[in-house]
Amino acid sequence: MMDGPTFIFDFDSTLVAAEALDELAEIALAGDAQRETRLARIREITAMGMDGRMSIERSLAERLAMLSMRPDMLPPLVERLAARFAPSVWQGRHRLASIADRVWVVSGGFHEWVEPVISRLGLRTRQVIANRLRSTAAGLLELDPSASPCAVDSGKASAIEAASLGRPRVMVGDGMTDWRVRELGACERFVCFTEVVRREPVASRADVVANSLDAVLAVR
């Protein structure tokens, strides 16, 4: 029997104080003549997806279409993200690692960078549910729709149910897709995590609003 709930963490703007595709854009658009305009548009699309003004399907598709993602961009992206853990998450990493058996990471991002980053917190890479990339004939990387359960608005809830994670479940995140896990009955509690960013349309729906890892881990 578990000693507490299963904690299910979002990745972007929750475990890390960044949005991975925004960070990837900084790398991918280096030297682009329209870099600043494109970066601003990607950040806008990210925000629209997170607070529910745009579907995750469209948000992902539009952002990835603006990038020419190559395999060599992944190592620097991992380092950028690993340098930007949310402060309380990094401070509390040993406490988080001590309950790693009941901590999952469910992200609309990609295994290719989520796994190496969360391993630095002492979390289990086999307890990650996220999307995957595939190579194109041109040597670029794109979304693999056959292996990307979280690339749709209800994807996180469906993937959590399919994985039969232990109950009670506490979903922790900052975006509308995280709240939908609660709306669709795939968790008992939704914690809106606000240490990195507070999105009012999400916070207003939460069972608990928490601005630190300690506050999250106190939820039962």
Image (tube, rainbow, N blue to C red):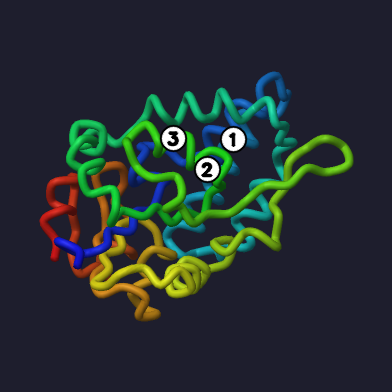
Q: Residue at x 62, y 54 (%)?
A: 60
Is 145 displayed left or right of 169 in the figure? right
Q: Residues within 10 Å of mark 3 (few under 14, many from 20)?
A: many
93 lies above or below 10 = above
- Tag 1: Cα neighbours inside 10 Å, few (<14), some, or many (≥20)? some
Residue at figure coordinates x 48%, y 42% from the top left? 114
Q: Which residue is mark 3?
A: 117
Which dot marks residue 164? none
Q: Nearer the viewer, mark 3 or mark 1?
A: 3
Residue at image position (39%, 45%) is 124
Identify the residue under disc 2: 43
**Which residue is situated farthest in the top direction here?**
31
Q: Amino acid at mark 1?
A: Leu
Q: Is residue 81 left or right of residue 135?
A: left
Q: Nearer the viewer, residue 162 or 78?
A: 162
The reply to whether dot 2 and dot 1 touch (C-beta < 8 Å) is yes
Mark 2 residue type: Arg
Q: Which is more N-terminal, label 2 or label 3?
A: 2
Q: Secondary structure at mark 1?
A: helix
Picture quarter with the N terminus: bottom left
Q: Position of residue 125 (x, y in %)?
A: 44, 45
Relative height, residue 128 to residue 25 (above, below): below
- Name the residue furthest front: 1
* Image coordinates for residue 182, horizontal then vertical, percent: 33, 74
**Sequence-first tag of 3 and 1:** 1
The residue under label 1 is 39
Q: Quadrant of residue 3?
A: bottom left
Between residue 126 and residue 197, name the one nearer to us: 126
Q: Residue 18, image x and y in percent?
A: 41, 37
Mark 2 lies on a secondary structure that is helix
Kindly report the distance in space between the C-alpha atoms of the residues bearing marks 3 and 2. Answer: 21 Å
Q: Position of residue 88 (x, y in %)?
A: 20, 37
